[in-house]
Image (cartoon, rainbow, N blue to C red):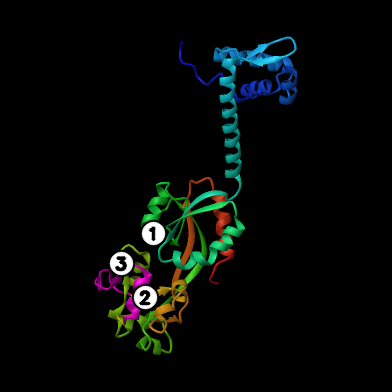
Amino acid sequence: MAPQTLAGLSLRDLEYAVAVAELRHFGRAAERCGVSQPALSEQIRKLEALLGVTLFERQARRVEVTAQGAVLLAQARAVMREARGLLDLAQQQAAPLSGPLRLGVIATLGPYYLPRVLRDVRARFPELVLRLQEGRTAGLVAALEAGELDAALIALPPPAGNLAAEPLFFEPFLLACPPGHPLLARRRLTLQALQGAEEADRLLLLEEGHCLRDQALSLCALPRGDREERFASSLEMLRHMIAAGEGFSLLPALAGQAGGGELDGLVATRPLDEDGIGRQIGLVWRGTDPRRDDFSQLAGFLKETAPLP
């Protein structure tokens, strides 16, 4: 026998057959399915011909399922359940911001920002299932472009031109230094003051790969590669280096506000007396992703609940 294809098999025909099997009557099955009895009977005959199996023993007043038909109709019910599950899943996915969302967050933002918004996000989008991933900008963008992430929270502008972006909030930088540091005594604390300070060579940095490192180097007008031995793998390690008296640095406001604990009294922070010194945080996603309306809706909510004015 030549291998059969699915071309002639329809879910509607399976629905008809299952209805006849349950009701043991062609007329009542046709009524349930909303078709005429002759039309239903004809489709059942075509289905039996396609399968090469007689599904029903037709008697004068009753319809019985054949032994072979019972096996096939059990499978037909399973197919119908899976088909309904497919429709339910599609409907769920079509609902705004429902189902899994793989969200990347840069490491210098995630631990300080996510605790402030996760409760609100879950309350506003109860059907949304977040799958969080922390990393550096380049790695998150690569994962986004490869389809391994759906969206990411990074500092704008995005490094790839094929990404769509929605700005969320501006996060200013704070001076972080040991108490008694000469910079704290400045009447006005500006970038020029940082660049001209005697302690300028004590600027502490994150290691290569963090966009915050590049921003600090650029703002403080230090050449790349300067003082390469003074770097930290994370903002928390950077905070410990400051507490140890090794130097000063620039911290994003959310990280600076999250200080305290065992380092309380060992790290002092002060805002700069200069506007625009910081980073713009935004939500980015692939420009070709058809869920752009969903991402825009999520970005709008995150903008409304921004932790900084």
Left of 267 or right of it: where is 151? Answer: right
Amino acid type, mark 2: Arg
**Of labels 2 and 3, the one closer to you:** 2
- Residue at the spot 68% in from the left edge and 20% down from the top edge: 20
| 43 relative to 124, above or below | above
Pointer 1 and pointer 3: residues touching (CB < 8 Å)?
no
x and y, in percent, of residue 128 in the image: 56, 52
**Which residue in the structure is indicated by mark 2?**
239
Q: CA distance from mark 1 to mark 2?
A: 19 Å
Whichever of labels 2 and 3 marks the residue nearer the N terminus, that label is: 3
Mark 1 lies on a secondary structure that is strand
**Which residue in the structure is indicated by mark 1?**
135
Snapshot quadrant of residue 47: top right
| 247 relative to 156, above or below | below
**Which residue in the structure is indicated by mark 3?**
207
Snapshot quadrant of residue 200: bottom left
Snapshot quadrant of residue 68: top right
Residue 194: numbered disc: none
Mark 3 lies on a secondary structure that is loop
Mark 2 lies on a secondary structure that is helix
- Residue at the spot 57% in from the left edge and 44% down from the top edge: 93
The extreme front residue here reads: 67
Q: Between residues 122 and 188, which one lies in front from this camera angle?
A: 122
x and y, in percent, of residue 138 in the image: 36, 57
Whichever of labels 1 and 3 marks the residue nearer the N terminus, that label is: 1
Please give the range of residues in magenta.
221-244
Asked if residue 248 lies in the magenta stretch, the reply is: no
Pointer 1 and pointer 2: residues touching (CB < 8 Å)?
no
x and y, in percent, of residue 129 in the image: 53, 52
| 141 relative to 34, above or below | below
Q: Residues within 10 Å of mark 1 (few under 14, many from 20)?
A: some
Q: Residues within 10 Å of mark 2 (few under 14, many from 20)?
A: many
